[in-house]
Amino acid sequence: MKLKTKNLLTLAELNPKEFLGLINDSIKLKKEFKKKGNRPILKNKTLTMIFQKPSTRTRVSFETGMFQLGGHAINLSSNDTQLSRGESAEDTAKTLSRYTDCIMARVYEHDLLEKLSKHSTVPIINGLSDTFHPCQILADFMTIKEKKKKFKGLKIAWIGDGNNVCNSMMYGASLSEVSMSIATPKGFEPDKNVLKESKKLTDIELTTDPFIATQNADVVVSDTFSSIHNRDPKRMKKFLPKYQVNSKLMKNAKKDAIFMHCLPAKRNQEVTSSVIDGIQSVVWDEAENRLHTQKALLVALIHA
Ligand code: CP
Ligand code: NVA
């Protein structure tokens, strides 16, 4: 899929055709991989990964994805780089651009990604910032497409914290014209500007009632109540027990609704074990699909 954007910092950089095209490419790469392995489309290409925060899925899916496409990934925890000693984003981006074909960074402040992208001559990918997680949403919509075979007419219920993943999911919903109902406690709503932008293309409703959000929902989504950047233990009181996805809440959604979670999950906080480990849960396919969507994105940005 040819993309107009050089970087992927948020899904706002994609148009609907590009978003849906990346999902289709991911499905094709998955099929090819399972049948006979992928062709070495990214032979001799390197990806530099910078992690200011911990990661399991993002780290391993990007590194494995590069390897399976014939390329190579270099992992740098932020302490391994001179960024941690005050080297500027500008100098870091200019330097890395001379060695590597793409930079993926997981950062605290989204602004650091903006700075890196301004000075990098190679693509910058957001591997999660405090405000967005676009790569997760590519995998989520690939999973929805696999399970529901369509996007048109679907409804997603987001339950819990209106966080970085929720912000990106609103963009994903708008690009695929899926409607969303978001149930959060007061004061934990998603980003107002993203909501306003996303509502131009699809219906998005905000509520404080998880039972309103899940009514007629095809997909029920939760995420941690305490994101890596937001670990105040007092937050829990605002979410529990009302915003926990449990069997009763799942029963309020459509009969064939699926449950999704980007992981890592805290069982019996944002979701009960019976739901996340139950038959409606698709979290392991969702996690696997990070690999396939990462590949499609890397090919689109590096190989273009
Ligand atoms: N979902 C996700 O991004 O997982 P990691 O934090 O393990 O990368
Ligand atoms: N919202 C979570 C997602 C982790 C993948 C966080 O930012 O920690």
Image: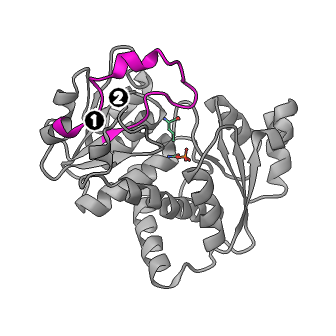
Q: CA distance from mark 1 to mark 2?
A: 9 Å
Are dots 1 and 2 in contact, CB under 8 Å? Answer: yes
Residue reaching furthest to the bottom: 36
- Measuring 17% from the left and 28% from the top, which residue is drawn there? 212
- Measuring 50% from the left and 85% from the top, which residue is drawn there? 36
Q: Which residue is mark 1?
A: 245
Q: Residues within 10 Å of mark 2 (few under 14, many from 20)?
A: many
Q: Which residue is mark 2?
A: 160
Vertical position of residue 27 compared to residue 115: above or below? below
Element at label 2: loop
* 109 or 56, nearer to the observer: 56
Q: Is residue 47 left or right of residue 98?
A: left
* Residue 95 x %, y %: 86, 48
Q: Quadrant of the C terminus?
A: bottom right
Q: Could you tell me the amino acid type at mark 2? A: Gly
Q: Could you tell me the amino acid type at mark 1? A: Val
Colour basis: one colour
Residue 217: quarter of image:
top left
- Measuring 51% from the left and 30% from the top, which residue is drawn there? 227
* 67 or 97, nearer to the observer: 67
* Residue 250 x %, y %: 19, 41
- Measuring 65% from the left and 29% from the top, which residue is drawn there? 111
Question: Any magenta on residue 104?
Answer: no
Magenta residues, as a range? 221-248
* Residue 260 x %, y %: 34, 47
